Image (spheres, rainbow, N blue to C red):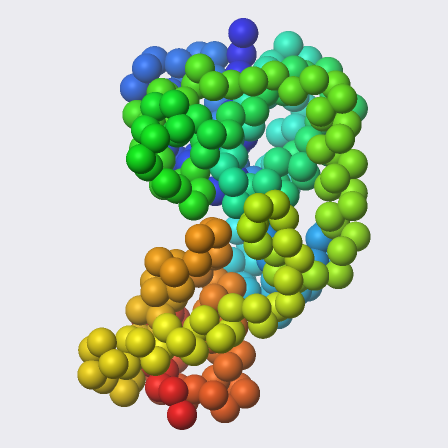
Amino acid sequence: MAILHITFNLATQGSMKLAIRQHHLQRDESVLSVHDDFSIGPLRSIEERKSWLTTHIFKDNDDQQLYDDMFGNWKKKIANLPCDMDVWIWYSQNAHEQIALRYVMSEFIQKCSMVYGIDATEGLKRIQPNMDIRHTGELSSEMLMKLRPDAKRFSVQECQQLAKEWEDIKEQPSTLRLWENGLQHVEEDALDALIIDSAKGLHVQHNEDWLMSTHIIAKIFETVDDYVGDDFVEYRLLKLVKQGLFEMKGDSTESHSYQVKLR
């Protein structure tokens, strides 16, 4: 039986393609990635979403073009999906992948393919109980192969429920969502205090006034239990610069080309 694997970041897609090659499964299996971060930005319509991403997240036209190309590829692929192809959705317990799971289910609810899910967070409890991940992109190709036995077919009722939850989620006006014992819609500035505290700690730790923005972003990634994309943290950091809480020197269009300092 042919299988289409759906992943929610490019790292998982790459690891899955490697696993398929290593186990000589290319004839029967393929991988498609949904290139987006569903934990941020409005979800009500693609037009509103792209406008928000263009204003706050995309750094240049290349980012915009990549988003458009991959979204177009995604829509074309699922529109032409054969009925005899099984769909395996890979996800873990974070806001982005949980919302993405519900979005994908809304796309497949009217299709004839059988849909399976692999919850990597749950699967790791069986094969690597001491390992914690924030998203599936942290898993190697070897680990993904070990999780394959955890594929569970969604019932019609489960598919319908997840698709309904997508309809409810996308109508919420929030532009930041976190996973804390379930999906939480929070204010867009919910991480600002943590960004400031992280900068204070790094100032003391390194005994330096000026900090690379990438160091602050990495600190946030270490601190927050949920997966939060680098681009959103950087957007909020630059927002704090505009508000006068940080000073900045360098070129803010390139993450490695500027530094910030708490006022």
The residue shown at (47%, 66%) is 233
Q: Is residue 52 above or below residue 125?
A: below
The residue shown at (36%, 77%) is 199
Is 180 on the left-hand or right-hand side of 136?
Answer: right
The residue shown at (68%, 24%) is 80
Give percent across and percent down for residue 63: 51, 58
**The N terminus, quarter of image:** top right
Give percent across and percent down for residue 242: 53, 86
In which quarter of the view is residue 40 placed? bottom right
Does residue 226 appear anywhere in the picture? Answer: yes
Give percent across and percent down for residue 65: 56, 54
**The C terminus, quarter of image:** bottom left
Q: Give 237 or 52, whichever is nearer the viewer.
A: 237
Give percent across and percent down for residue 208: 23, 84
Q: Give 99 or 3, whichever is nearer the viewer.
A: 99
The residue shown at (68%, 39%) is 103
In which quarter of the view is residue 79 placed? top right
Does residue 38 appear anywhere in the picture? Answer: no
Q: Is residue 257 above or below residue 44?
A: below
Q: Please state the total of marks drawn on the protein image.
A: 0
Is 168 on the left-hand or right-hand side of 194?
Answer: right
In which quarter of the view is residue 184 placed? bottom right
Is 174 on the left-hand or right-hand side of 128?
Answer: right
